[in-house]
Amino acid sequence: MKVYISGPITGQNNYRERFAAAEELLKKSGYEPINPAEELAEMPKNTTHKEYMEKAIALLACCEGIYMLEGWENSKGAHIEFEYAARNKLTICFERRAEDEEYHARERRNMLSLRLTESGLLQEVHRRASHLRKSCKSQN
């Protein structure tokens, strides 16, 4: 199964490392990762965000799943990719960087095995929005 890696790139210093780590995790889990940080790295410096996203969506269209890196909620491009994946009923999985090794082992076994239904997708979006609101309140 081809899985597209989605996450924040613009303004991130370590995005290539994060995408490479996700690519390695997906490979070890038996998937064929599509890493836009590498695939689109040779685009000209004057490429617009719209042009970049057109290429990114073309790559995503070749996949059966999408792996959302932590922080995707803060990325305009990742939101576009997420919406495309949801509309086209791709399998969606979210990165969780927990310290618990048992959690990671279980996540690798179950990664991308659950196709979110529209209601499940909405529940996940609402759960994440609630979590973001709580973390914003605790920072203030």
Image: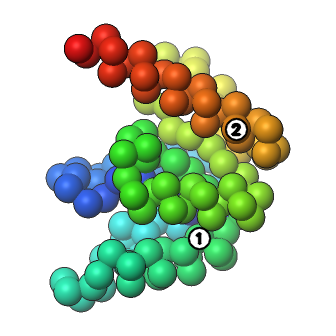
Callout 1, which amino acid?
Answer: Leu
Q: Are marks 1 and 2 in contact (CB under 8 Å)?
A: no
- Identify the residue position indicated by label 2 in the image: 122
In the rendered structure, which disc, 1 or 2, sits on the residue that comes first in sequence?
1
Kind of element beneath mark 1: helix
Residue 131: x %, y % from top left: 48, 22
From the viewer's side, name the closer residue of 106 and 43: 43
Residue beneath the point at 27% across and 85% down: 47
Residue 36's x, y, as percent?
A: 43, 69
Whether residue 33 sits left or right of residue 23 in the image: it is right
**Could you classify mark 1 by the number of other residues whose Cα lies within 10 Å: few (under 14), some (14-19), or many (20 or more)?**
many
Q: What residue sits 29% from the left and 81% below the top?
A: 48
Q: Nearer the viewer, mark 1 or mark 2?
A: 2
Observer-nearest of 122 and 2: 122
The answer to whether any part of residue 24 appears in the image is no
Query: Which residue shows up at 25% across the image and 15% down it?
Result: 139
Examine the rendering and report whether any part of residue 53 can be seen. Answer: yes
On residue 77, the disc is none
Quarter of the N terminus within the rendering: bottom right
Residue that mark 1 sits on: 60
> Up-down: is 54 above or below 60?
below
